[in-house]
Amino acid sequence: MPTQRPQQELQDKAEQNTQNAHQTKVQKVIHSAYDLSLGISVVVAILIGVGLGMFMQKLSGSVWFLVLGIFWGIGAAILNIYKAYKRAQKEFEALAKDPKYSYKKQSSDT
């Protein structure tokens, strides 16, 4: 029976490693999809703004609502880009603090 216990522990560790590897793969896919969605969100924001502008133009008959909708869409797209920039900036700051990636200048006392 003593041989089963270490074998069970090895199986548990292997199962945990498999779960951790799966989680990191899923996190990479989610992160990649989030980065790809920035371009899509810019286009969608502008299209929604144009759509709202066209809708308000048809209701009121004024061209200025279409122009206003275009500016709303562009403003929303710029806001999406700004949010993505801030998120990336936080990630890069965390990476810069990681000792694995820090650069330490060697002293030239030789």
Image (cartoon, rainbow, N blue to C red):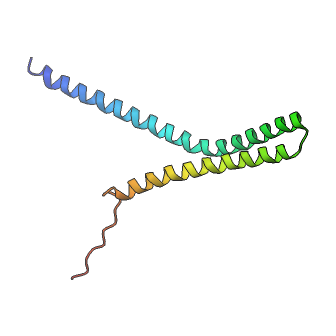
Q: Residue at x 35, y 30 (%)?
A: 19
Of all residues, the one furthest to the bottom in this rendering is 110
**Residue name at image x 32 percent, y 57 percent:** 100
Q: Nearer the viewer, residue 63 or 14?
A: 63
- Between residues 51 and 108, which one lies in front from this camera angle? 51
Question: Eyeballing the image, is 108 above or below 81?
Answer: below
Quadrant in which the N terminus is drawn? top left
Task: Specify the quadrant that holds the C terminus.
Answer: bottom left
Q: Nearer the viewer, residue 24 or 47?
A: 47
Within the image, what quadrant is residue 4 found in? top left
Q: Is residue 25 above or below residue 64?
A: above
Residue shown at 80%/40% (left/top)? 53
The residue positioned farthest toward the right in the image shown: 61
**Spot occupied by residue 67 in the image (x, y as percentages of width and height):** 82, 48
Q: Residue at position x 50%, y 37% from top?
A: 30
Residue 99 horizontal side relative to residue 25, left or right = left
- On the image, the x and y values in percent for residue 98 come to 33, 55
Q: Which residue is situated farthest in the front direction here?
A: 60
The tally of labels here is 0
| Image quarter of residue 47 | top right
Report the side of 71 relative to 86 (left or right).
Answer: right
Residue sitting nearer the eye, 47 or 59: 59
